[in-house]
Amino acid sequence: MVNARREPVEFVVQEGRPSEWQRVVDTARESPDDIREPDRGAPLTSARYTVGPRSAVVLVRPWIMSSVDAGPRFHIRRPPVSYV
């Protein structure tokens, strides 16, 4: 989420439960809480997230493929491609 305005802007997570999402980047926060390792993100507590003025936020939605995996994996959901 990117906010280029001079005032905070509220965004709404459109998919899944808020607790499924983790914040890994929020450039409005003080260091060291502004950037986190993907496997140590801060879980969201609400579907609404306020992005500070002239800031960017990155959320990830970790998921585990199977019990054999070494740990959480992250995937990017891409919109379906339509060819004409």
Image (cartoon, helix red, strand yellow):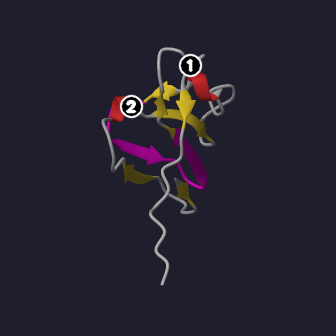
| Amino acid of disc 2 | Glu
Q: CA distance from mark 2 to mark 1?
A: 19 Å
- Quadrant of the image occupied by residue 45: top left
- Mark 1, Cα crowd under 10 Å, few <14 / some 14-19 / many 20+, is few
Q: Is residue 37 visible to us here? A: yes
Quarter of the image for residue 47 reads top left
**Residue at (65, 26) in percent of width and height:** 37
Secondary structure of residue under mark 2:
helix
Q: Residue furthest bottom?
A: 84
Q: Nearer the viewer, residue 3 or 80?
A: 80
Q: Secondary structure at mark 1?
A: loop
* Lower sequence index among marks 2 and 1: 2
Q: Is residue 66 magenta?
A: no
Asked whether 46 or 68 is in front, the reply is: 68
Q: Position of residue 46 (x, y in %)?
A: 32, 35
Closer to the camera: disc 2 or disc 1? 1
Residue shown at the point (55%, 35%) measured from the top left = 74
Total tally of numbered discs in the picture:
2
Which numbered tag is attached to residue 26?
none
Q: Position of residue 75 (x, y in %)?
A: 53, 41
Q: Which residue is label 1 attached to?
A: 69
- From the viewer's perspective, tell me whether residue 25 is left or right of residue 50: right
Amino acid marked by disc 1: Asp
- Which segment did they paint magenta? 44-59
Question: Is residue 61 toward the left or the right of residue 53 in the image?
Answer: left
Q: Residue at x 64, y 31 (%)?
A: 30
* Residue on which the image places disc 2: 20
- How far from the left and from the top, in percent, is residue 80? 44, 64
